[in-house]
Amino acid sequence: MASRYDHPGEQAASDPIRLLAIRDTPLSVDEVFAAVGDDASGGTAMFVGTVRNHDSGADVDTLGYSCHPTAEAEMRRVAEKVTAQFPVRALAAVHRVGDLEVGDLAVVVAVSCPHRGEAFEACRKLIDDLKHEVPIWKHQKFSDGTEEWVGAC
């Protein structure tokens, strides 16, 4: 008798990376969610990173993101690593560059897997590795006149 894990829906999709982009326009949670829709997925996990009004105890007035020309290729490398480690049915990640305001979406990632636990783990791995390995930099200006660059890698 075949195990439940023998079903094709329990396996990673052959081409699960559905959307990867770095954009200078507002991001859409709906677009990312739609990109990871998959009939064989029982779990979809999403992370939405927004610009907050403070960092390290200081009030943030403005924030801008910039990236290296290789950033999208590095996003693909990170996504491929996640899809190799988990049974990902669908994956999407978009990151914003340019000037953002408090409340704006900075990054949206989502992963669909056969089961919720896998989806949570894969999504966490995706956002953590994206933040640590993709060359995207944040420039924060604080209300006290100071500023700070924060590098992703």
Image: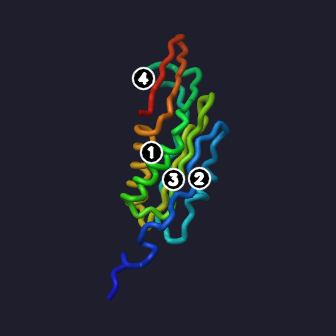
Q: Which mark is residue 148?
A: none
54 to 11, vertically: above or below: above
- Front position in the image: 69 or 99: 69
Residue 63's image quarter? top right
In the picture, measured across the screen, residue 103 lies left or right of residue 40, that is right
Q: CA distance from mark 3 to mark 4?
A: 27 Å
Mark closer to the chain start, 4 or 2: 2
User: Label 3 is placed on what type of residue?
Assistant: Ala
92 to 100, vertically: above or below: below
Mark closer to the chain start, 3 or 2: 2
Q: CA distance from mark 1 to mark 4?
A: 21 Å
Can you tell which of label 1 and label 4 is closer to the viewer? 1
Mark closer to the chain start, 2 or 1: 2
Mark 4: few/some/many CA within 10 Å (<14, 14-19, 20+): few
Q: CA distance from mark 1 to mark 3?
A: 9 Å
Residue carrying label 3: 110
Q: Mark 2 and mark 3 in contact (Cβ < 8 Å)?
A: yes
User: Label 2 is placed on what type of residue?
Assistant: Val
Mark closer to the chain start, 1 or 4: 4
**Which residue occupies 48% across, 22% down?**
149
Residue carrying label 4: 56
**Which residue occupies 40% across, 38% down?**
132
- Quadrant including the C terminus: top left
Measured as percent of width and height from the top left, residue 40 is found at 50, 71
